[in-house]
Structures are given as structure tokens and as C-alpha cells.
Amino acid sequence: MNPFYDANKSLWNAKTPHHMKSDFYQLEAFKKGKNVLREIELEALGDVKGKSILHLQCHFGQDTLCFSRMGAKCTGVDFSDQAIKEARALNNELGLDAEFIVSNVLELKDNLEGQFDIVFTSYGVLGWLDDLNAWAETVSHFLKPGGTFFIAEFHPLLYTLNWDNQTIEYDYFNLGKPDHEVTDGTYADETAGVKMDEYFWPHSFEEIIMNLLDAGLKLKSIKEYPWSPYPCFPNLEEVAENRWKFKNLKKELPYVFSLEMEK
């Protein structure tokens, strides 16, 4: 771990209890059987019954456990030990058979063996990583030949914006050092008493895709979406079920992209 990752790990350890209690994650509905996965990943991955899935940066495991309910054999990974503690407790409470591992994704080769039919990651993951070359190599390492890598992630363009007023404030390209802010609350609970340092890195479309291609993956599908499947930014309004856009922005922009790739 480096100082930036140490700070971010402390941040996510502090966020997790608030996320567990927030309306954003709909935890009680999830426990009663609600599938909280979004249409983007459900349509792309289809029937996962009988498949093995490695879920990178799984937070406290809700999406992982949804795949488990769908019949997949799942392994979730996150660097937050608090999040993984909660994921394991949820798994036991629900009588599922997912496994959860505490690890930085970039160090996963030291903490996990085997290969998987599907490697999956989604929504707010890449900005916490400084090295997408190592990330892509990790994805390829754990993916079976013929297996599918799928990512649904917030668009690089979206990360250049000040979300309060939709003006450009951050670099589009990764210049090697992280941006730093002091977070106040969380996207799931603005009133949460979390005021801590966070460090994040921008990654361009070129950086994301070329590292995956260089790691031996073949591009099968790329899509961009003019809406967010989550209300996790300021000043959003719901324009259709589980589709949000900025209230005051009259132009269309990409909020999310997805990649489906094959080894």
C-alpha cells in the first residue's frame, strides 16, 4: 500500500457503515430478494447460472451476492476490510456461497489463485487506481481463455466536471499524480459525518481501452449511455426508472460507458 491508497482505504472503511444504512443501497429490500443490479450489466451478462465470477472492487458485496442468487459462483474483492467484513456477514445471513477477499486489486495475484469465466467491475472503480496497466494485467491473469471481462463505469468525461455546476474542473488525462479533495459526507448519504482525505486519478478512454487490449483482451462491445443508473451526483433528476441526468444541463453527454471484452 502507498499513502494515497492508505488514505482511501481509511475513507472507504469510514463510508461503509453509512452506506449500509442509507436509502441509496436499499439494503433491506435487497435482503428480501430485490436484485439491485442495473439493466446495463444484466442485459450484457445475461444468464450467469453455473458460471464463476470475479467481482473486483465489490464494496460490501451487494452486486456480488445478486450474481450469487442468480446461480453464479462468486468471489468479491475489495481493499476495505470493513466492507469485506460486512460482505461476509451478508453472505452468511442470506445463506449464500460467495467468497470475499480483502485485497488491493493491483496486489490480487498475491492473494488469490485460479481463473474465472467472468471478471466484472462497475461504477466508480477506476478513479481509485493509479496504474491501469497493472489493473488490466490483473484482469487478464484471472480470466479464463474465452472468458468475458465486463465493466460498466462512469464516463471519463463526467470526471472532468464539477458536478455542482457542470463546468470543467479536472484533467481528462492521467498526469501521474492524483487529485486530492477532502470529502464531506458520501454520495449515498450527504449528512454522513465523514470528512476525510481522498485521492483519485483521471483515466482517458484511450488509457482504459489500450491497456486492456495490450493485456491480450479482444474488444467485443463498447457502449455509451446518456444517463446515470444511480443518483450519486448532485443536481440530478430521474428522467425514467433508474435513469438520472443533470437538472440544469440541456446538452446530452455520456454519463456511463460499458466494455465487453474476451480473452
Image (spheres, grey):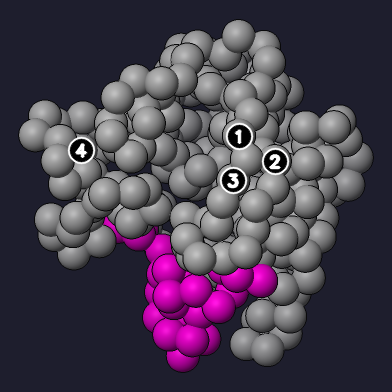
List x then y, in percent, for residue 30. 47, 81
Q: Residues within 10 Å of mark 4 (few under 14, many from 20)?
A: some
List x then y, in percent, for residue 66. 50, 71
Q: Earlier in the sequence, mark 4 or mark 2?
A: 2
Q: Which residues are magenta?
A: 17-42
Q: What residue lies at 86% left-to-right and 30% top-to-bottom?
A: 2
Badge 1 is on which residue?
181
Helix, strand or loop at mark 2 = strand
Tags 3 and 4 in contact by the CB under 8 Å rule? no
Residue 183 in the image: above or below residue 131:
below
Q: Residues within 10 Å of mark 3 (few under 14, many from 20)?
A: some
Of badges 4 and 1, the one in the foreground is: 1
Of badges 4 and 2, the one in the foreground is: 2
Q: Earlier in the sequence, mark 4 or mark 1?
A: 1
Badge 4 is on which residue?
226
Tags 4 and 1 in contact by the CB under 8 Å rule? no
Q: Work out which residue is located at the far left of the displayed protein and give it.
A: 250
- Tell me which amino acid carries mark 2: Asp
User: Which mark identifies residue 17?
Assistant: none
Give the alpha-carbon distance from disc 2 to disc 3, as whole Å: 6 Å
- Tell me which amino acid carries mark 1: Glu
Q: For residue 251, what is the image quadrant?
A: top left
Badge 3 is on which residue?
183
The question of residue 167 being in magenta is answered with no
